Amino acid sequence: MEDLIQVLEEAKSWLSKPENTFGYSSVWEDSSMACEDIDQFIQDLKDRVEFKVIDLQILFAPTGPIQEISIYSGWGKEFLLLADRFDKALLLYRTRS
């Protein structure tokens, strides 16, 4: 769970950058909306509240909301590394849950 939370915290850090472009986002209007969603997942994990894993996977999916922001904001390569870490952390989380 800690690995997954760490990846989400890093995603939140990227999403909160003031120079990000949200105009092409299919989900979020601005960084506060994005960070609010990420915060909710983090809190659910910490509180051990059940949530739909698919909702979390969609955020990190190819052409998903985070990648949309990353491409238009200049950190697309960094997103790919983050998404890889997310996949590994999620697999570990699911095997332990």
Image (cartoon, rainbow, N blue to C red):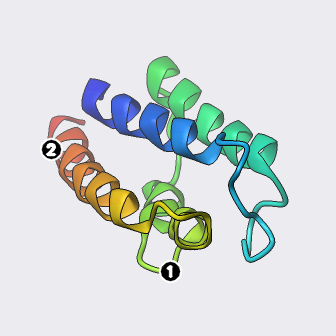
* Residue nearest the viewer, comparing 10 with 77: 77
Q: Which residue is mark 2?
A: 95
The residue at the point 84 percent across, 60 percent down is 29
Tell me the amino acid under the disc marked 2: Thr
Q: 10 Å neighbourhood of mark 1: few (<14), some, or many (≥20)?
A: few
The residue at the point 52 percent across, 30 percent down is 42
* Residue nearest the viewer, comparing 25 with 49: 25
Q: Position of residue 59 (x, y in %)?
A: 52, 62
**Residue 60 drawn above or below residue 52:** below
The residue at the point 23 percent across, 58 percent down is 84
Quick check: 10 left or right of 37? left
Q: Quadrant of residue 62?
A: bottom left
The residue at the point 74 percent across, 67 percent down is 27
* Residue nearest the viewer, comparing 48 with 4: 4
Q: Secondary structure at mark 1?
A: loop
> Which quadrant is the N terminus positioned in?
top left
**Residue 57 drawn above or below residue 15:** below
Q: Which residue is mark 1?
A: 63
Tell me the amino acid under the disc marked 1: Thr
> Which quadrant is the C terminus positioned in?
top left
Q: Earlier in the sequence, mark 2 or mark 1?
A: 1
Mark 2 vs mark 1, CA separation in Å: 26 Å
Q: Position of residue 56 (x, y in %)?
A: 49, 55
Q: Quadrant of residue 66?
A: bottom right
Tally of numbered discs: 2
**Residue 67 drawn above or below residue 95:** below
Q: Residue furthest top?
A: 47
Q: Secondary structure at mark 2?
A: helix
**Residue 39 drawn above or below residue 32:** above
Quick check: 18 left or right of 87? right
| Residue 9: mark in rendering | none
